[in-house]
Image (tube, rainbow, N blue to C red):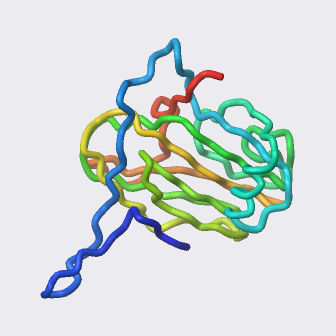
Amino acid sequence: MRWFGGICAVVLAAGLIGPLAAQPKPVAEAPTATSHAPGLAVDYYFEIFNEIEELVDWMESAGPRAGPAIAKLDYKVGIGKVLTSDSNDFVGAHIRGLLHLEQAGAYAFEVTSNDGVRIDLGGEPLFEDPSVHPDTTSDPIPFQAASAGWYPLEILYFEKKNTSTLILKWRPPGAAGFSLVPETAFMHTKR
């Protein structure tokens, strides 16, 4: 697993103080029901991927196939359809939309994936587990919301073959533990 700019260390003469959470930026204007719809938009790419960067390269050269919106990220599939696609294997997904953070404060994500995944929030890269792997749950992924609001969310994900998993949980400020990010927290621009 690799952490991106979402975690940075502060070094002073006294030594390492500790990690600072990423501070994503919200969208300037709140989405409206006329311009946005519930869930997250997804475009699919059908190819054999072994790394997230292969999906990124493929996205630059191949046309996407729009899929049905993803209501929530709670997919743990045996041998079956990947996310909302119509395929069981060799699926790449570009998932995007908005995530509603109801209050300012310290949040954390926890992501379980099989296979590769990359998450950006509010223009900040937060997490990447880039290659083929069995079901793997991340360590907590901290981030700091300076204000309540809607934040751009972008996820790249691929499944190579056999089983697929993509689950996104969060721990909002003041929560004791992680819970599934609810459907009501997601919106996407209508197509």
In the displayed orientation, state which residue is furthest to the bottom.
14
Q: Position of residue 157 (x, y in %)?
A: 67, 54
Q: Quadrant of the N terminus?
A: bottom right
Q: Is residue 76 above or below residue 31?
A: below
Q: Which of 57/66 is in front?
A: 57
Q: Is residue 116 above or below residue 19?
A: above
Residue 91 as seen in the image, left or right of residue 119: right
Q: At x 63% / y 34%, what residue is drawn?
A: 41
Residue 165 as seen in the image, left or right of residue 1: right
Q: Position of residue 124 (x, y in %)?
A: 43, 54
Q: Is residue 98 above or below residue 35?
A: below
Q: At x 19% / y 87%, what residue is drawn?
A: 15
Residue 5 as seen in the image, left or right of residue 41: left
Q: Which of 6/164 is in front?
A: 6
Q: Quadrant of residue 164?
A: bottom right
Q: Which of 144/185 is in front?
A: 144
Q: Quadrant of residue 129?
A: bottom right
Q: Which of 81/54 is in front?
A: 54
Q: Position of residue 156 (x, y in %)?
A: 63, 52
**Labels in figure, total:** 0
Q: At x 33% / y 33%, what residue is drawn?
A: 149
In the displayed orientation, state which residue is furthest to the front.
61
Q: Position of residue 95 (x, y in %)?
A: 63, 43
Q: Quadrant of the C terminus?
A: top right
Residue 87 as seen in the image, left or right of residue 34: right
Q: At x 53% / y 54%, what residue is drawn?
A: 119
In the displayed orientation, state which residue is furthest to the left.
14
